[in-house]
Each structure stands twice: as structure tokens, then as C-alpha cells.
Image: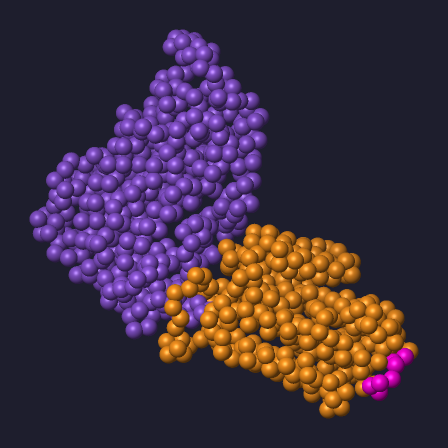
Chain colours: A orange, B purple
Amino acid sequence: MTGHRETTMLSRVADNLYWMSRYLERAEHTARLIDVDLQLRLDQSPTAGSDRWLGLLEALQVPAPENVPLDAEILTHLLTLDRANPSSIISCVAAARENLRQVREQCSSEMWEQLNRLFLQVKSTASSDAGLADSHGFFRAVQDGAHLFQGIADSTMSHGEGWHYIQLGRFVERTEAVARLIGAHFSRFPHPLDQPVESEEYLEWVGLLKSCAAFQAYCKAHTAELRPLRVAEFLLLNPGFPHSVAFSVDRFHAALTAIAELTERKAEQPVRIAGRLRATLSFSQIDEILASGATAYVDSIRWQCAQAHAAIQQVYFDYSVESALVA
Amino acid sequence: MQPSRTRTRGLLRRINLPESAQVLFRPPFRNYQFDSAYDEMFEAPGIPRPHYRALFQTLLDLPSEELRKSQQAAELSFLHQGITFTVYGNSEGTERVFPNDLLPRIIPHAEWRKIESGLTQRIAALNLFLEDIYHNGRILADGIVPKELVYTCRHFRREMRGLNVPRGIYVSICGTDLVRLPDGSFAVLEDNLRVPSGVSYMLANRKVLKRVFPTLFRDYGVCPVDHYAQALLATLRALTPPNFSSRHEPTVVLLTPGVFNSAYFEHTFLAQQMGIELVEGRDLLVHDNVVYMRTTAGLRRVDVIYRRVDDDFLDPLCFQRDSSLGVPGLFNAYRAGNVSLANAIGTGVADDKAVYAYVPAIIRYYLGEDPILSNVPTYMLTDRTQQNYVLEHLDELVVKAVGESGGYGMLIGPQSTAEQREDFRSRIQAEPRNYIAQPTLSLSRAPCFLDGEAQARHVDLRPYILYGENVTLVPGGLTRVALRRGSLVVNSSQGGGSKDTWVLRA
């Protein structure tokens, strides 16, 4: 037990902020993935369809629906406006809003208004007759809405403990999502690592980069010639690109360090796990990683991420009374 | 906007002539109506009371378009701040803005002084009463208050027998409903001694009115109310539990039932204003009879709980077993003297509407003084003669369920249907202890700005009384308005609104 502190943050409140941020990040990620996928599909023969859908579902960790044809309309609905699917965009935005609603007094009113507006927008699309007629516009609106929210949070909320939980949720989610996406892609396209990809497959690799909002940034660094090795290096290890795994881990480590400092719990599990993960990434060489298999590597990242998440829950949100009293 | 001195004088000269009074009724008072009720603004048609003159003149001078705009601005600001309440027993659109009326209700200083001393006397006596009935029961043994009345009260908590509460204060936060009778005197309609609400509206109304009538407000010399949250915090801090020993200030939290409660806005507002944590039952836990809140930095001991959760839901081990709003073990921690609750458990017995009838006797018994504020005559239905009288006059009386509040479970005779009266007749006969009856009161009326003009509406007054180291009343309170024409019910859940209350400086 710690002594008297200047500020107190209830575990429930921290938990709500963390999950709010994870859900919003998930909604944004899903919107971008489907948007990129639908664009890509336009350039392909209609028969290539069902395989791609399975890949997308895997990357989003949504179980493939049974007894249903894998057709664009059904699956797009499942992933965007289906309330019964807890990972759909509408479910994620609603969950983010519900989490924030319960702790409204902890954030700025601008933040609440923005998230509320985004929710109402998604809801009105779901109930309108036109539905997803303008799908690209819809996915853009979701991404913009989430970006705007994070921007508003950065500029209107005090960068104290609560803000750090928002950062934490956002980057834990992003690390997992990008790692999962890379894993799924590399197992589907076992292309020779250090050769430029061409023709049909080229578009798939563009798709991977675009799904991480990374195509333009990659081209600036390596030109439009895509080699799996460089793509993997860029998405996994680039320290400056905001959707790379290394960047995301760095941010969530920073948030955890700040939280540990503020709560006077410096030596705790979460920081240790995140610190180890961060060190692994900064000392890894891409050829070594790929030699032992990209999939195995990202699986280990995801596993450590899950460990960090469990440790955060256990130390800050849901600790046992005994453990808290002994300290 | 403020009338010049000469113009005010000129007006006063003119309105001394009663026959010209009606001619003077310019907008927004063109359709203002009078009846037998006491009018807060006018002593006679067209003649404002001295303390209302400046407001009256301002309203005559102000284009009603401007008032209308101010009103819209006020409504919008309430909506944006989310100053809403929840209506129970109504499935659609349960969240509503609490309507605010723009015209202040003005109370001269001398009147307020009387209210203040009357309520101070009352809260002192009621606390002594609670301490007595949960200890030796002298007042019951002396036959001043019938034993069975106390012991049959649904809000009597036998668990509280013999428990000593900090400073002997059971009720530290109280909101008493006053009404003004046709003769101009104030009377107590009911005491709210459990979890009275509405104080946030008092503060929100004041904020809006200061914006709408800045000059008028300043020139009137209105006593401030903005220090309420600070006074509340001081009151709560004064209630340190018996076993409290720390160099620090006690840790105070506000316990809310959660987002679905009708007063959730007020809970967040007060917690924020006081700078204390707003907790739910699941944020608290009891270990070894000590209450902790679960924070990210570990468990933190809680010393005083301002609970906005009813007795029934506080502790599932002790009271309602299926409640998830409370904290298992809280009552034992309370009993052990490790935490204080404000208000204490079991205070509802003293605001039971049947016990209410005995409050004047309670004041005399403990304080040896005559009550400063009178009660409203009340018929006890357990008494055969009184019951017969009530059943014969149901169409004239108001019947109330003793344990209810918020305007639920009542019959207003003159406005009731034969069917409703039959319903109440059988309910009274089945459970006479559960009901009381009172004459239908003619509540005083005050001008409200409705549909672009001033209209007379019935009002009451709920001042808030704090009792910690000493008794504090923030000068003012919530003036509740029955916005429906002719309606006598001012509760927010029954179509009421509220207006700012200006208590004038000496």
C-alpha cells in the first residue's frame, strides 16, 4: 500500500480509459483494412475472392461465419455494421463510447463530444437505407473521427495518468494488430525475401503497406520497389514510423514508465515485460528474424504483448486484495 | 438595463392608484393572473412588493424578445452541460433537461433569517430524536411519539440500535421543503433526511442568472451560494470516524449508484466541485472492517463516505441481498468505527410522513422551545376518527404514501378522478399506517417566463442545511416551480422546473 498521493485514479476509471482507447484503435484499424481490401479487390479477378476474405478475417481475428457464402456484401456488413459481431466497427465505436461515458468527468468535454459525434455518425449509417453505399467515405470518416479524437485528447486533456492510459490502450492494440497482420501476410505469401515482388503479387504487398498506412512512408525510404525483407523491416523495426511495431512498443513502454512513476510502482511486471520487448526489437536484425521465420517472430511479439496486457490488468486494475495489502 | 431613479419613482407614484393598475399591466405582465394564493411578486394586482420593484421595472423595460433569447441561451447551456435527470417508470426518452425559469425568486433578508433559525432548530431536534430512538428511546417511553409509529416505519433500522455516530450527527445533509401559505408565512411540507438532491440545480441556476441579469444581480445585493461545495466538504470532513488517527485530512468519497441514477449528473458535479473521488460500489472493498478504494496506485483507505445510495442498497450482507450497488461488509466497518457515512443509516424514520406530524412535539420535547416554522396540518389515518374524516373528504385532501418521495404515490383530491379516489380509499383501508392526508395547500405563486410572457405558477422552496462542526445554510435554495398551469406538484419527475432564489443581504 502506498501513502498519501497528490492525485488518485480509481482502477475502474483507468480500466475504462484503457479499453476506450483500445476499442477506438481497433475500429480505426478495421476501417483501414477493409477499405484497402475493397480497393484491391477491384483489380482482381472475381474468383480470387474467398481466399482473400479468409486472410482478412484472420488478420482481424474474426471467426469465419459458417453456412454463409463468403461474399463481399455479407462480409463487409459483418465487419462494419453488424452489432452481433463484437469486433465490428460499430460495436467497437459503441464500446469505446460506453467506456468513456462512464468516466465522462475524467476527460475534457471536447473529447466526449467528438467520440459521441463519431458514434452517432456510425449509428446513422447503420440505420440509413443507403447503408454502406459510399463505403470508402464511411471508412474514411471512421479513421478521421478516431484521429480527431486522439488529437483532441492530446491538446485538451492534461497529460497526467489518465492520458497515459489512453496512450497505453492505443499502442498495445496497435502492436498486436500490426503484428497479427504481418504474420498473416507472410504465411500467405512466401515470396523469396530479398527479391522484388512483381505482377499480381505486387498489389498484395502494396495492400499490406497501405493497411498500415505505410505505403507512402515506405516509398520515401526505399522507393516503390517492394522486397519482403525491406517491408518486414519497415513495419517491424522502423523506429520513427507511427504504425511500426517498434514505434508502438516504444510508446506503450513510455506510457507504462510514466504510469509506474506516477503510481510509485516502479519495479512492477508490466514495465519489465514492455522493456524487454522494446529491447528485443531495438537489437533485432531483420535477416535473423526472417531466417527463423517471420511468423514465429511476430507470434512471440504478440505473446509478449498479451503478457503485458495481463500484467497491466493485474497490477493496476484488478489486483487481489491480499497482494495490495502485503506491499 | 437598470431603471433610473426618477423613473422608478414615477412608476411608484402611478401604481399607488389601484384603478390604474390594470392599465399599467404592460407586457410581459399583460395576462398575469391572481387568485387566493400568496403572490411572491405583487402585494396587490399591479403593485409589486418593495423587494421586487427593481425586477418588475427591468421586466417592463426589457423587450420580451431579448428575454426569450436569454431563455433559449440558458436552455442550450443546460443541454450542453448535460444537466439532465432521469424519469423512472417511463421507458422512452428517459433523460430530460431540467427546465429552468429565468425570473428569480427574491427573499428579503428578514424572512430568510427566520427560515434559517427555524431550520437550524429543526435539524437539531431531528438529530436528537434519531439519537434517542436508536439508543434509550426516552421520547417513546414518555409517550410523546407512539412506539409503534417508529417501530413500524419501513426506514427504521434495528441494526443501528446502540451505534454511536460521529458527533452524534445522523443527518448532516438535509433538504427541507417549505411552502408559503396564503397568509405569507412559511411552513414545512416535508423534511428530506435521506439523500436529498437538487443542490446542483441551485448552483447551475445561479450561474445562468448571473449571466442573464448581471447588473440587476449586482445592484440587488444577493447573498452568494457558490461556496456550497466547500461547505459540504468541510461538513463531511468534520465527520471523522471514531477510529480515525492520521495527520492527514480524512479521505472523503462520494458513492454513487452509477450512470443510470436519476441524479448522476449531480453526483459527478459535486465530486468535481469538492475535488473528491466519485466512486461506485465496485470501487470499494472492505478488508478487516476497513474500507478501501481500488486505485491504480494500490488500495487507499476511505474515511468518510458521502453516499448517494439508499440504505437498502448499501451493503448486501446487511440489507437488500441482491443489491450490486453497495459494498459487502460496509455496515460492519461502519459499526467498527472505521468509516463514517453521511447521512447515517436509518435517518428515514425521521422523515416518514407520519412521524412528520410529531416534529413540533419533538422540538418542544428536546429543545424546550416552540417551533419557529410551523407544520402543515396532517391527518393520521391510523386514528379511526381522522380516517373517517379523510375518507369522506378525499376530493378535498392530498393523500401521500408515508415512505415515498419525489411526488410519487400521491393523490391530489381536487384534481383526482373518482377512480383514483376509490383506489386510494381501498389502499388506505388496507394499510392505514402507510398513508397520511393533508389539506390541499394553496402554494404561493411567482411569475415565470413562459411562452414569451410572465405567468403566475405555484412554487415551493428547498433550502439545503449542512450539519457538521456547526449548522450551515447556504442562503438560498432550490425554488421549484409547477410549470403546468394550475398544477400544485413541483417535483422534477412530475413536470416541475426550478428557478434561482435570491436571498438579499441585510
Q: Is residue A313 above or below residue B435?
A: below
At which x and y percent is residue B15? 41, 11
Q: Nearer the viewer, residue A272 or B342?
A: A272
At which x and y percent is residue B251? 35, 60
For the stretch drawn in magenta, what is the main secondary structure? Answer: loop
For this view, does A191 lie left or right of residue A241?
Answer: right
Q: Nearer the viewer, residue A163 or A178?
A: A163
Q: Is residue A270 above or below residue A113?
A: below
The C terminus of chain B lies in quadrant: top left
Q: Is residue B470 above or below residue B220?
A: below
Residue at 42%, 54% (x, y): give it: B275
Residue A260 appears anywhere in the view: yes
Residue A181 appears anywhere in the view: no
At which x and y percent is residue B48? 39, 19
- For this orientation, the residue located farthest to the right is A199
Q: Nearer the viewer, residue B1 or A58?
A: B1
Residue at 15%, 35% (x, y): give it: B370
For this view, does A236 lie left or right of residue B341?
Answer: right
Residue at 36%, 17% (x, y): give it: B44
Stretch in magenta? A192-198
Q: Nearer the viewer, residue B14 or A18?
A: A18
